[in-house]
Image (spheres, helix red, strand yellow):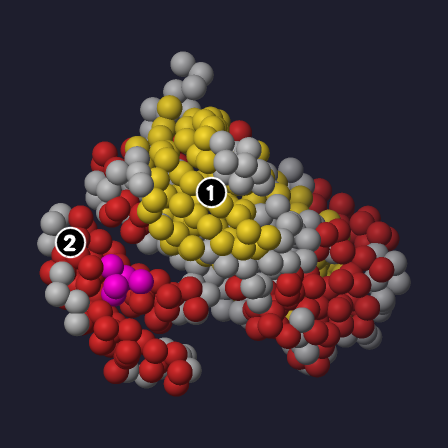
Amino acid sequence: MTTLLLSAATLSLAAVANSGSTNDTIPAVASSSDRLSTLVAAVQAADLGGALSGDGPFTVFAPTNEAFERLDDGVIEGLLEEPGRGTLTRILTHHVVPGRLYARDLLEVDSVETLAGTELSLEGIRGRLLVEDSIVETADVDASNGVVHLIDRVLVPPTVVAPLQQLLTKAIDRGVPLYNSGDPEACCAVYATALDAVALGTGWNLSPMQAENVRRAIEDADAMIDAGSRAWAYRRIMDALMESRQMTTSRPAPADESARKVFTFDDRSEIQDWRIVLDGVMGGLSTGNLRMTGDSMLFTGETSLRNNGGFSSIRCGVEADTFSGSDSIKLRVRGDGRTWIMGTRKSNSMGGDSYWYRFETVDGEWMDVVIPIREMQRHFFGQRAPGSISPEEVKAIEFYIYDKKAGPFSLEVDSIEGVQANA
């Protein structure tokens, strides 16, 4: 396998026009290739050219222009502009490994650690070197301070979980089961303790105005006599904090087997398990609101295409095996005439992997939508990727409005259930 891969890599060096000599640094080698112009622009935008021209040595997994084109529309532009620079730097350093590692070296190890402090898995399959989900198209392009390997996908680093997110997520994990078991006072105690830590502590990266708003909101919630109302008021503060910090990790749903198998939204506690995730992570300006209306969950808001935005979503963890014994997910929904996405995930941690199924709605009309789980298409941070999900693997579900249109949206969900559509 090593011989095959190295032979292919040597032959494919001709595919890189003017790849440069070993007297050229890594940025110079990249600049000389027509296939790496997008990467060069990204390195310049992140101001990493100087660092990658240093002594090193470095091993760079360089996404081609075609790899960047796999990203959803607007993602590249968003990263190149100022609001996305921090994310861009982390993504680029996720592609750089200390040392000069040729293909033969990479085949000898299972993983390598990047300059971003992340890990990349390595595997040799059928004479090709795989780095995570990407294929090395051209290997061993020498530079004076390292070596470059061209890959066919952009590698996306794992999400960094902020301390504030960790605190509030843990509080929600502990508070929800208490509320659902009929003890809202205990739930309030958990929520209030976490919020007091935020209001009285430091290091949460809140502006003075945000901190003051949190303190005032807590005071208003503290004054509520009814424990159930107080718990909901605390929870709204926590959700607002998490949304303002662009936190996208959902938490596990409470241990209520019947509620996890069928969402009927007859009990308002069911909506408490859902989290709104907006395009603000990329600087977008879309909005989203979630509430109960009668016996349904209503998701409304407005999508904006400004700042390369355009999506709004809601997500919820489900217990393992919720959809075991089913082959499809059946929805009872009333939409707005726009195209929606039903998503599933293999992990409550959310991350970048999601499995999508698009469905059309008719404005103002109730409809049943049956979604074959194994036919849902895998997306990795907006990129189509190979892979599928089985009913037994579903640990989270979500709804996206992501049709590249600006304007108000509305989706009312009456029920979600697992069914055997092909029985």
Q: Indicate yes or no whether the magenta region holds residue 233.
A: yes
| Mark 1: secondary structure | strand
- Residue receiving disc 2: 178
**Any mark on residue 411, and which?**
1
Q: Position of residue 381 (x, y in %)?
A: 56, 52
**Left or right: 362, with 7 as reference point:** left
Q: Residues within 10 Å of mark 2 (few under 14, many from 20)?
A: some
Image point (24%, 47%), residue name = 269
Looking at this view, is 360 or 223 the one in front? 223
Q: Quadrant of residue 248?
A: bottom left
Question: Most extreme residue toward the right, as rendered?
Answer: 18
Q: How far apart in space, not on screen, are marks 2 and 1 (Cα)?
A: 29 Å
Q: Is residue 237 above or below residue 260?
A: below
- Which residue is located at x 21 percent, y 40 percent? 256
Kindly give the residue lying farthest to the top in the view shown.
423
Q: Decide which of 380, 280 is in the foreground and name it.
A: 280
Question: Which residue is at 80% across, 72% downward?
Answer: 28
Q: In the rendered structure, which segment of residues is drawn in magenta?
A: 232-236
Residue closest to the eye, 77 or 60? 77
Whether residue 381 is visible to the viewer of this picture, yes or no, is no
Residue 386, image quadrant? top right
Q: Earlier in the sequence, mark 2 or mark 1?
A: 2
Measuring from the top left, give residue 382's x and y in whole percent: 59, 50
In the image, is 190 to the left or to the right of 406? left
Where is residue 62 shown, x and y percent of the image? 70, 60
Q: Residue at x 81, y 57 (%)?
A: 35
**Of the residues shown, which amino acid type is indicated by label 2?**
Leu
